[in-house]
Image (cartoon, rainbow, N blue to C red):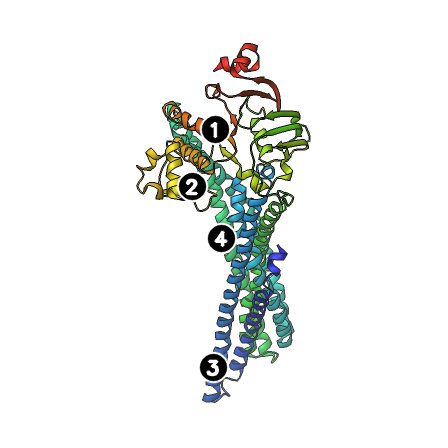
């Protein structure tokens, strides 16, 4: 985080200069007030006006310097947030898929919002407060000791008392606020589940039980919230009490010293003003430290994420290579952890063949595809396309020649047209309409409010309609290799039958991998692979595998 703060040093210097200027003038102004009071009866009308003008200028200067400080601080915060957001987004675009799969997406989103806000409130806004506090304390002590040592000692004793009171209150408050945050999380989760699964709740007559569960959490939140707010509210009254006692002590001691001729009425006024100025940093320091701790915790999370390993691909010059679709896995090994998952995996696929991959959940079906796409890197062995190791094919060229339709593909908050042409340039509307018709998506697109210009985010589409658009997207790309991960799983049987012929047309001459759970969709595949624990245990055509009466037969019979 230090790197981000030290960038744009001119802004940082300006913030420091104006913060120190504000602090110095804040300390100097009370001295001037005291001098005016001491000489008030001696001053002529013109001198009085002159002194009042000077005093006014001092306070206007504080106001102006504060505005300038806020201006540069706001700019600095915006710059830092912009830089961090750019780095986070860049990291998401380059991080290994294997690494990003380990992280909850909600945690990544929090770094763009909550963690950035914490850094702004803590490190960035806390920085001028700390500089100001240090400057005020140092200059105030110097000035107070010069005016009167006894009065200075009183204030020097009062200030730490306020600090320890504030620290004690904050310490106790944090416990309740942490408890409240945990309960809020549980309450929100409970409410989200209750709303999301309303059909299930009603089907099982769980409404009354859910209400009682919610009421219990809500009561806990109420009780903890009251305690948290009560302790939090104690800070100001407690510190004001000490501050008021300080005023009384300053007043009494000041009168005694003035009667002995050791101090003037103007000096007493100055000390009254310092009671507020000098003690304020001690009152705020606990809150600043708490903000800093939160900010450091957030910066650690961001730093940890930014230090995740990126995808690393060597620079390939043969970027114009035309992939045909002959694929070979040779002695491939891969592991998610230290334990090998895929061992000595071998597979040869000829151009234009359709290969169906089946097996129970966790068998490794999607892993094979991820290795082919280089979303994950193999530990040992080689994968070849057209006799070339995929590590020797430019990653852009590799992925442009592989089209994927995933089971859970989502659309982006763009127009229908932009979603279909996603990642492609200079695509005509006629080309988009052509593939939409081929994918049987044109029927519902033409019924949308703005047809192909309809913003997806503003229009509710069924899962089947979303899938049809993603199929049209792949058709438009016209890749050499197809990957269909339960591509028609969210489409009803009638719609599925309507697009089967289009899918067969799309697959002609293309090497196709079909990950299937519904075995009725793969009976015409050239070869079916049955995977178990990342390895092929059976392979052949649909009829051949049924005749073996092995694993595939059992799975097919169960459906």
Asked if residue 67 lies left or right of residue 310, the reply is: left
Disc 4/disc 1 C-alpha distance (Å): 69 Å
Q: Which residue is mark 1?
A: 507
- Which of the two labelled residues, at mark 4 and mark 1, occupies the earlier sequence position? 4
Give the foreground label among 1 and 2: 1
- Which of the two labelled residues, at mark 4 and mark 2, occupies the earlier sequence position? 4
Secondary element at image label 3: helix
Q: Which residue is mark 3?
A: 53
Secondary element at image label 4: helix
Q: Residues within 10 Å of mark 2 (few under 14, many from 20)?
A: many
Of the numbered discs in the image, which one, if any, rests on residue 233?
Answer: 4
Q: Which residue is mark 2?
A: 419
Q: Residue at x 57, y 21 (%)?
A: 529
Disc 3/disc 1 C-alpha distance (Å): 86 Å
Q: Residue at x 56, y 60 (%)?
A: 283
Residue 211 x %, y %: 40, 31
Secondary element at image label 2: helix
Asked if residue 264 lies left or right of residue 210, the reply is: right
Give the foreground label among 3 and 2: 2
- Which of the two labelled residues, at mark 3 and mark 4, occupies the earlier sequence position? 3
Give the foreground label among 3 and 4: 3
């Amino acid at each position: 985080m230090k790197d981000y703060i030290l960038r744009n040093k001119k802004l940082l210097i300006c913030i420091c200069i104006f913060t120190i200027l504000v602090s110095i003038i804040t300390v100097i102004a009370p001295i001037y007030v005291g001098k005016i009071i001491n000489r008030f009866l001696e001053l002529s009308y013109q001198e009085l006006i002159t002194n009042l003008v000077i005093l006014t200028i001092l306070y206007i200067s504080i106001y102006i310097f504060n505005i300038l400080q806020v201006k540069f601080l706001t700019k600095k915060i915006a710059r830092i947030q912009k830089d961090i957001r750019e780095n986070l987004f860049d990291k998401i675009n380059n991080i290994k898929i294997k690494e990003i799969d380990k992280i909850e997406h909600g945690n990544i989103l929090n770094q763009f919002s909550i963690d950035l806000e914490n850094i702004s409130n803590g490190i960035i806004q806390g920085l001028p407060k700390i500089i100001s506090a240090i400057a005020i304390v140092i200059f105030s002590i110097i000035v107070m000791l010069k005016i009167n040592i006894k009065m200075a000692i009183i204030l020097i004793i009062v200030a730490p008392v306020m600090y320890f009171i504030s620290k004690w209150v904050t310490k106790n408050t944090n416990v309740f606020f942490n408890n409240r945050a945990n309960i809020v999380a549980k309450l929100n989760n409970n409410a989200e589940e209750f709303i999301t699964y309303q059909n299930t709740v009603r089907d099982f007559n769980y409404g009354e039980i859910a209400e009682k569960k919610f009421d219990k959490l809500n009561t806990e939140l109420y009780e903890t919230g009251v305690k948290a707010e009560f302790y939090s509210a104690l800070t100001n009254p407690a510190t004001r009490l000490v501050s008021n006692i300080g005023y009384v002590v300053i007043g009494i001691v000041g009168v005694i010293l003035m009667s002995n001729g050791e101090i003037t009425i103007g000096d007493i006024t100055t000390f009254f003003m310092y009671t507020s100025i000098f003690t304020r940093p001690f009152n705020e320091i606990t809150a600043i430290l708490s903000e800093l701790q939160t900010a450091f915790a957030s910066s650690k999370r961001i730093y940890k994420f930014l230090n995740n390993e990126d995808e690393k691909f060597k620079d390939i010059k043969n970027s114009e290579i035309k992939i045909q679709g002959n694929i070979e896995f040779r002695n491939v090994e891969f592991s998610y952890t230290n334990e090998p998952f895929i061992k000595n995996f071998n597979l040869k696929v000829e151009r234009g063949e359709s290969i169906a991959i089946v097996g129970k959940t966790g068998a490794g079906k999607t892993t094979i595809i991820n290795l082919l796409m280089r979303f994950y890197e193999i530990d040992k062995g080689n994968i070849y396309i057209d006799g070339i190791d995929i590590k020797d094919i430019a990653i852009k060229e590799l992925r442009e020649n592989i089209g994927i339709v995933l089971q859970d593909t989502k659309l982006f908050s763009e127009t229908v047209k932009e979603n279909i042409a996603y990642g492609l340039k200079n695509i005509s509307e006629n080309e988009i309409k052509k593939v939409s018709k081929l994918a049987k998506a044109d029927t519902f697109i033409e019924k949308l409010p703005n047809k192909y210009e309809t913003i997806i985010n503003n229009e509710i589409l069924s899962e089947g309609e979303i899938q049809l658009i993603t199929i049209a997207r792949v058709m438009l790309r016209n890749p050499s290799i197809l990957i269909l991960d339960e591509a028609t799983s969210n489409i009803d049987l009638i719609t599925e039958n309507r697009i089967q012929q289009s899918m067969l047309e799309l697959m002609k001459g293309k090497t196709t991998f079909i990950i299937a759970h519904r075995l009725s969709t793969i009976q015409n595949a050239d070869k079916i692979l049955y995977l178990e624990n990342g390895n092929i245990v059976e392979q052949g055509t649909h009829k051949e595998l049924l005749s073996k009466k092995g694993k595939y037969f059992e799975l097919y019979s169960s459906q």
